[in-house]
Image (tube, rainbow, N blue to C red):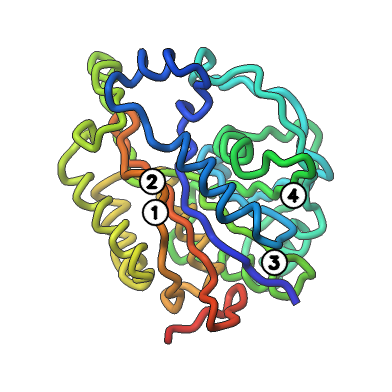
Amino acid sequence: MGEVAAAIFTTHVPRLMIKDLEARRAYMGRNVTTFYDAMERLARERLDPLEFDSFVLFDTHWFTTLDYVLNAHERLEGVYTSEELPAMLHDLAYDYPGDPQLAHAIEAEARGRGLHALASAHRNLPLHYPTLNVMSYFNAGPKPRRALSIGVCQTASIANDLAFGAAIGAAIERSARRVVIVAAGGLSHQFWDLDHARIRASASPDDISSLANRMYDERILEWMAEGRHDAILASAAEFRARCSPEGRFSHYLMMAGAMGGADWDWSGEQFGRYEAALGTGQAIVYFARPDDEPIRAGAARRA
């Protein structure tokens, strides 16, 4: 029987790939992001000692329309340059084993539940930088773990996302995989306009594009810390409508669905600060399995 070893809600911002210290300060000024150290520390202190087989990533830059699409390639390899910010993110070489077996198992489970899912191994199916930036930190060892990237369906409802997440949880449980689920995306997602973006490029929360967005983001982070996923799900429709969260918040919704929906109660450990990125809200939160209860994917229980 498979299980989820941990879950992560994480930023993937392109500034993670600015390696030069002076270039970081030139871009962000005095409030340089804490995420460089936070990503490395999470990988070193939480993931490196953890026994697991595969990462399952929800990628908020991969928008699909008619199906939930999973990357079913045997290997994910190539060189990536961002069409959005090529000066900041370019010539990124990557090479990870894929997980087509798990991709097809999820496809079968989802279709068996009447959901639209496609495990795609079509030639030149692209990868996006939420997957690649996160993997460059979390999967950087000499023997990288499998990586399964999954898109966000832009026509899906909250109920659809939770149902597909539940199918993922059930497929993991029936598999031989021990998995870390990664929701690769931010919180509120309203950018500064072009005339103000560069002068508001710091990581300070004061540079979130609106106070209302900041307050809502901080409330969600408090609920994550408390394991109040029921409260987050109850407010998801309002959060979508008021704060335009990245990926329509589907990365979190699918993760929560895989972990039991409103019954999921794992508390979160935040790495780094809550930060701004060109007006958007960003954070890194790690959810460890409770030591005293063997909770399996798709079958979390409240104490």
Residue drawn at (39%, 54%) of the image? 270
What amino acid is labelled 4 in the image?
A: Arg
Mark nearer the N terminus (3 vs 1)? 3
What amino acid is labelled 1 in the image?
A: Gln
Mark nearer the N terminus (4 vs 3)? 3
**Residue with the mark numbered 1:** 270
Instruction: Identify the disc placed on residue 111.
Output: 3
As measured in the structure, the alpha-carbon distance from the residue carrying label 3 to the one carrying label 1 is 35 Å
Residue drawn at (40%, 44%) of the image? 186
Task: Note whether 183 is above or below 82 in the view shown.
Answer: below
**Residue with the mark numbered 4:** 145
As measured in the structure, the alpha-carbon distance from the residue carrying label 4 to the one carrying label 1 is 23 Å
As measured in the structure, the alpha-carbon distance from the residue carrying label 2 to the one carrying label 4 is 24 Å
Answer left or right for 58 relative to 237: right
What amino acid is labelled 2 in the image?
A: Ala
Instruction: Identify the disc placed on residue 283.
Output: 2
Mark nearer the N terminus (3 vs 2)? 3
Q: Where residue 2 sits: x, y (%)?
A: 72, 72
Pointer 3: residues within 10 angstroms few (<14), some, or many (20+)? some
As helix, strand or loop, the secondary structure at mark 4 comes to loop
| Residue that lies at the very extreme toward the bottom in this rendered image | 303
Quarter the N terminus occupies:
bottom right
As helix, strand or loop, the secondary structure at mark 3 comes to helix
